[in-house]
Image (spheres, rainbow, N blue to C red):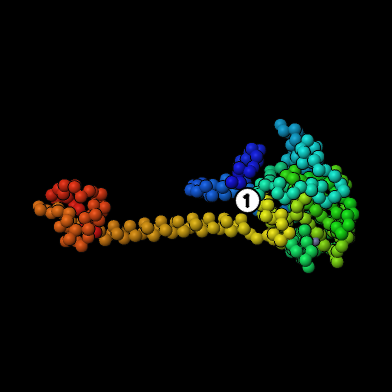
Amino acid sequence: MILNKLSASTIVMALVSIISWTPAEAQDTTIRTKKQAELIVPRPAFQPVQSMDGTNSNAMDTLDTADPGVKILLFSDYTWKYYKDPSYALDSKVFSDNWEHEYPDPYRVSLETLPDEIGLWIVDSLSGYRCPNQTDVYSKFGYRHRRRHQGVDLPLQTGTPVYAAFGGRVRMAKYYKAYGNLVVIRHENGLETFYAHLSKIIVSEDQWVDAGSIIGLGGSTGRSTGPHLHFETRYKGYAFDPEWLIDFHSGVLRHRLFVLKKKYLNASSNYVPEDEQEEIDIIEGDTQDREEAAKKAEAERKAAASAQYHTIRQGDTLGALARKYHTTVRKLCQLNGISERTTLRLGKKLRVK
Ligand SMILES: [Zn+2]
């Protein structure tokens, strides 16, 4: 169901991620149900991702790879990483359609035109993630005093660096009404992230940013009662609870592959760990199956241990034996894998219990 919604390239990505993220230890690859298959195939995609640490070393050199859009960055501390050359993403319609600097929602599409579920790759082997401001959520997504709150409020001290959660291109970088100093970044998967109330904006419109780049400093500009980062996640202009994506307390990204459900694009749709519950249900189902199988095997073992046999003598019939051992002909046939018409041979052992 999820896979159907993903493009061929995404499936390739899924394979790449399975190769690079599957732990070395042997895994049980037995797939018994379609539902399990759906969960197992993209499973690495559902693994949480730690917020990355900023590297203190500078890039020394850039090397080409076979893919013109992918470079290798060499750092002064001899580490390296793959890097997606953003200028190649310029070809992508994501960064040209509905691309303007004036409004938080440049799409103005109706909710009915959006699919029920959208599979979005949040990070892959080339795109990182950094928690924009790791702290407990002070004010959650949803209705607040009957007013829509389209993001989460993350307290900070004025001047604290605010990081781009993912790589992308800056669509807005300006003072905008109640948001105060606002940065909006659009990402390759179509998501947009909003960073509001900044004391200082460090990026400019149309600029490409990496995950973890400092895009501004935290503050309290616009309609704000104290220094905090107001952070939003939007798809096609519709905000959804960022807690579906990020656990701000631990800074962990919940999924590499995020299945955005249309119902999340509703102002009262707060994060609930639903997908985890689905997995728990399956694991519990598995355990139940195993327990039932074990019970059945134990019952069979007990029955076998208490089995009684009768050696066929002259004149024995199934009917007579059934009466003698207080059972039925049918049961005797079942126990011995014979039919009522089977000839009872003298000296043969027949199981009667
Ligand atoms: Zn807010």
Location of residue 142 in the rendering, given as x and y in whole percent from the top left corner: 74, 62
Q: Is residue 22 something that shows in the picture?
A: no
Which element is circle 1 on?
helix
Left or right, 334 with reference to 288: left
Reply above or below: 14 against 285. above
Location of residue 188 in the rendering, given as x and y in whole percent from the top left corner: 75, 43
Viewer-side residue, 282 vs 77: 282
- The residue at the point 17 percent across, 54 percent down is 318
- The residue at the point 74 percent across, 45 percent down is 190
> Can you say which quadrant of the picture contains the C terminus?
bottom left
Which quarter of the frame holds ligand 1? Answer: bottom right
- Mark 1 belongs to which amino acid? Phe
Reply above or below: 91 against 29. above
Q: Is residue 64 something that shows in the picture?
A: yes
- The residue at the point 26 percent across, 52 percent down is 334
- The residue at the point 65 percent across, 49 percent down is 117
Q: What is the quadrant of residue 9 in the picture?
A: top right
Viewer-side residue, 118 vs 55: 118
Residue furthest to the left in view is 314
How many marks can you see?
A: 1
Instruction: Sort mark 1 into few (<14), some (14-19) or many (20+) by Cα contacts within 10 Å.
Output: some
Q: What is the quadrant of residue 206 in the picture?
A: top right
Confirm or reject: label 1 Cβ below 8 Å from ligand 1. no
Residue at the spot of label 1: 46
Viewer-side residue, 54 vs 14: 14
Location of residue 122 in the rendering, given as x and y in whole percent from the top left corner: 70, 48
Location of residue 172 in the rendering, given as x and y in whole percent from the top left corner: 85, 49
